Each structure stands twice: as C-alpha cells, then as structure tokens.
Image (cartoon, grey):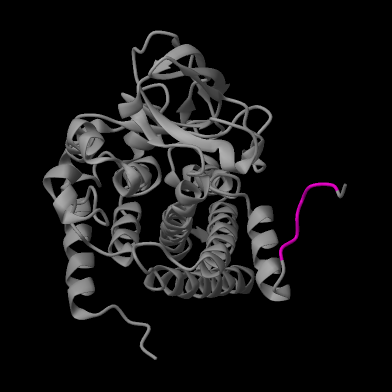
Amino acid sequence: MDFELDESQSLFRDSVRGIAERHLKEKAAERARSEAVPRDVAELFADQGLMGITIRDEDGGQGGTLMDAVIAIEQVALVCPRSADVVQAGNFGAIRTFAEFGSPDQKERYLNDLLRARKLIALCMTESGAGSAVTDLQTSATPDGNGWRLNGSKIFSTHSPEADLFLVYCRFGPGVSGIGSVLVERGAEGLTIGNPSAFMNGEAWSELHFENVEVLPENVLLPAGGFKKQISGFNAERCGNAARSLALGRHAFNIAREHVITREQFGRPLCEFQGLQWSFAEMAVKLEAAQLMLYRAAVSAKDGLPDPALTSMAKLACNTAGFDVADAAMQAMGGHGFSEESLVQYCVRRTRGWKIAGGSVEMMKNRIAETVFERRFSQRPGR
C-alpha cells in the first residue's frame, strides 16, 4: 500500500507551492489581520487554475480530483494561511453544491463569474434555532403565482457581508422531504443584510433577513426533496475543512520548530530541553496520523464525493490535531507565539473555529459511532 503522492500529484504540489511562495508569502500576516475577503488572491487563483479544481471541465472547472483540491489547500496554507480560505471557497461549499446541482441556465448565468472570481457565493444554512439540527430550519418558500416568496433569517454564513449570490436552504413544505434551496442575488427586494459581526478568528459574517423575497422558478436550485442531495456535498466540504485545520496546525508547527532551534534560554537552545522535545514529538505524530486519515478519505471519492464514514474520521482527527498542535506550538513560543505579530496565534484561533464549523467534532463522533455499531442513533427525544 503506497501512501506517497504519485508523480502528477507531486508536480501539482510543487507548482502550487511555487505560486504561493512567489505571490502570497510577503503579505501573509497582513491578510490574516484583515476581515475582508482577499479578492486579489481569488483573481490570482482563477488565473492559475486553482478555482473549480473538482468541478467538471464542461462546466468551466478543472476536472480534477478531491485529492488535488486537498493538496492545493495544504500548499497554500503552509505559506499563507488566510489564502487557503480562497481555495476552500473556490472548490468546496456553496460553489461545489451549485456546480453539482445547478441547471444549465443557472450555471450559464452565475458559474463562470464565480470561477473567475468576479462574484462570490455564500451558503446560508444555519439559523438561530437550527445549527447541528439543520433540519429544524424555519426559513420558508411559499407559493406565490408562478414562483415563491422567501421568508426567514440566517446566521453564521461565511462571506455573507460581501457575497454577490446567496444559496439559501429553505423549507417548501413540512419535514426533511420539504427542504430544498434557492438562489438569491444581493440587492434583491426584501433581503436585508445586517451589520457585520466577527468570529474570534476575525472572520466576518452578517445576519440575513428575507422578507417576502421573490424567488422565480429559474432560481430554485433544488426543490422540496433536495435536502439529502445538497447535504451530501458536505462530505467534500469537510475534507476541505480538515485540510485547512491540519495545514494551519503544520504551519504553526513549522514556525515554532524554527523558534525553538534558534531561541536560547539558560544558555541553551530551547530544542535541547527534553520537555519541548517530547512536545514536538507528540505534535509530529498527531500531524502525520491525521494526514493519513485525510488522504484516505480524499482518495475514497467516487463521483466526486468521499466516503461519509472516512470523512467524519478525517475531520475529527484533523480538527483535533490541527488545534492541539497550533496550541502547543504557541505554548512553546511563549509570548512570541501569543503576540499578534505571529501567525501562530492566528492558526490557534482559526483551527478552534473549525472544530465547530462544517459539522462539529461532536457530530462527527456521532456519525463514527453509527459506523461502529452499524445502526442510526437519533439525537431527538423518543416519542
């Protein structure tokens, strides 16, 4: 069994790393301190073929594999952690769901602009009463003449303060079978975008309110009954989340490793103290173990989507390893790692958020337990 990248993957890895080193390294810290989406990076990646890596070439993408997208995230994040978000946004989440299920007309109207970084799409799923229990969502699309009227609100939508297009999960009818999704353009009558709020990592989001927003038939992405289709895309999304978590942990590890080699205390380099040696040994094992689980999940992709059980394991492993390693790296560097001048503290804050986003680590444990016991465990109270 071979765990090494093949020749084409190695060449792709080196190419992406070269792009990142040439164009992103110099302002990496500056990007990490900014709440704004780095659209200049998105334009660069569009020109370099790093947007739509896994999207079919007939739809304007690169027709690559999930493993290719994971490699791209890793190599960008190792140079500029913030720019890895652009790879994620250009290959996973809303854009991937849209490319997978959008009609030819919808793709013609929006997809090329999204892939060329001329427009930005946001996925609107979470509500104040529907987080992990997303099927409890209340945002509704009710029939109105030839179309529908959308009413409700969404929170925690990545890119919502700046997005040009919103992919909104909504309810056409009762139950899971009544859930689908629609497309709403920024500026639509009845759409209110609240003032930006910030997560602990500095990333901004805005509360979205939909009040009788008109949705024409051509802007229905998936009608009632489409929930399972669109949520299946989260297995690919979670591979991107896991890749960023792990890569930022490794980024912090690399910075801290250099620090303890060169920094002296008590007349000796820090790396000569056994306590730090053991800490770095533990970090290295966590990174390597999680890396193997991530790659196994990525190569399991069939028809573009990876195995759900392997993805849950990979996300749990990478979220945990990424945060634990970044946190240990910050501890090893003391005040230098805790300072805003260092990207290590940024990696700590970012990896902590990914233990929640894209399916919390607790939900991943639930999914893994179902695989272990070969049965489904409902989280809802029994009747």
Nearer-the-camera pick, 249 or 122: 122
Q: Nearer the viewer, residue 183 or 330?
A: 183
Residue 36 at what x, y percent from top left?
Answer: 35, 26
**Magenta highlight range:** 376-381
Q: Residue furthest right?
A: 383
Q: Quadrant of the N terminus?
A: bottom left
Instruction: Name above or below for residue 185 compared with residue 118.
Output: above
- The residue under the point 69% across, 75% down is 372
From the top left corner, tell me how far across and down residue 381 is, in percent.
84, 47
Q: Quadrant of residue 181?
A: top left
Residue at the location (15% across, 47% down)? 60
**Left or right: 251, with 95 as reference point:** right
Percent x, y of residue 192? 46, 11
Please give the name of the residue rendered at 60% of the width and 53% of the height, measured from the top-left corner.
Answer: 331
Q: Main secondary structure of the magenta part?
A: loop
Quadrant location of residue 302?
Answer: bottom left
Q: Is residue 110 left or right of residue 126?
A: left
Q: Is residue 355 above or below residue 148?
A: below
Query: Does residue 353 appear to the left or right of 161 in the view shown?
Result: right
Q: Nearer the viewer, residue 143 or 363?
A: 143
Looking at the image, can residue 365 be seen? yes
Q: Kindly identify the residue that appears in the image at 39 percent across and 37 percent down.
A: 32
Visible in this render: residue 267?
no
In the rendered structure, does residue 326 fall within the stretch colored magenta? no
